[in-house]
Amino acid sequence: MRVGLLAYGAIGHEHNLAVQATDGLELTAVCDTNPERVAAALALAPDAVAFADATRMLDSGIVDLVVVSTPPNTHYEWAKAALARGIHVVLEKPMALTVGQCDELIDLAATAGLTLVVYQNRRFDRDFVTLRRLIREDAIGDVFHYDSFVGGYSRPCDYWHTDATVSGGAIFDWGSHFIDQILNVFDQPIAHVSGINHKRHWLHVTNADHATVTITFVDGTQATFTYSDLSAARKPKYHVLGTRGAIVGDWDPAGEPAVADLPALIHLAGIDGARSDVALDSVHAYEFHRELSAHLATGAPMQVSTRQSRDVVAVMEAAEESALDQGRPVDPAIKR
């Protein structure tokens, strides 16, 4: 399967490494307007053809699958262009900025018989995989409350991540990871979603300084995700309560200042107050790409489905709508 990379930053480099390590995938093209980034891609894949124009790459006839790593507000545009040319698509998250765009892309891919999938890479993080296993093994009984958090107290960057018109806002930026994890743990109907955005301090950017999403499921179980640039004291990455204990995912202090780059330290807390460390599960490197290659070759199922990524957007869109009305609960446009 001939692969083209559309935009080559840090995540594009990650895809390049994965393609080199995955049977059935071959990097044949890379497109970026920055010559230095193109040179970095060709250092790993010297036989790939370089492009500075994305349309020319899609029209080249040397790409069967394109990985779209452009900013979120262009995901819909480039996925639609690729699907129209009969090219399979891997999208960076979020899938798009509206549910309507997601549904249109899903319909286009289905009509053309093409694969469309989102690179939900945090689904394969060792700390989350371990946390999910513990929940599924009933290690803490029935789970009724799930908190997740990322952030700290720091000045946001000036890149597109902090421009709400490009990124979709703070909820879309990191929520694309953490809300996907929540929906992967709780595969049950959602009663409603609420969201709050605070804009209080960092006025040089348009993303919220602090944002919280609360998902309430029909049985009363609640899951929250919080992103903050105003958290002088961090909450745990994960704090999960069950009827017979709790799971805590503490930030690894060795990760400072980029604490989010390391997996959390997972602990089990019993009802007797005892606390035990949990060794993180092993995860095969580039598992998403291995599954993708097998799916394209044989139709084998993947852990990540397009419907799941579409529903993540539905939850985030509902949270943003709720935030405009001071947290009023909103019924997300989930497809079941």
Image (cartoon, rainbow, N blue to C red):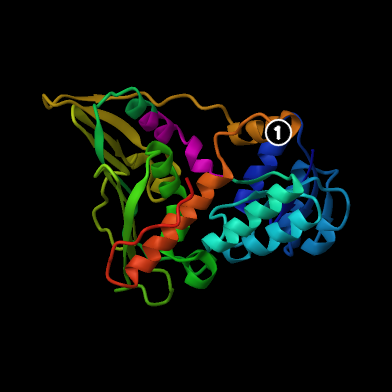
Magenta region, residue range: 119-132
Is residue 10 something one can see in this rendering?
A: yes
The residue under the point 43% across, 58% down is 316
Question: For the view shown, which residue lies furthest in the bottom direction?
Answer: 203
Residue identifier under label 1 = 293
Residue 307 shown left or right of residue 138 in the figure: right
Image point (55%, 34%), residue name: 303
Q: Residue 336 at x, y = what percent?
A: 47, 45
- x then y, percent, for residue 160: 54, 67
Badge 1 element: helix
The reply, left or right, for residue 205 in relation to residue 112 is: left
Dot 1: few (<14), some (14–19), or many (≥20) neighbours within 10 Å?
many
Find the residue positioned furthest to the left: 272
Front in this rendered view, residue 182 or 72: 182
Residue 238 % position (x, y): 31, 41
* Above or below for 89 versus 19: below
Magenta: predominant secondary structure element? helix
Query: Which quadrant of the structure image shows residue 174?
Result: bottom left
| Residue 213 visible from this viewpoint | no
The three-letter code of the residue at mark 1 reads Ser
Residue 294, quarter of the rendered image: top right
Q: Nearer the viewer, residue 258 or 149?
A: 149
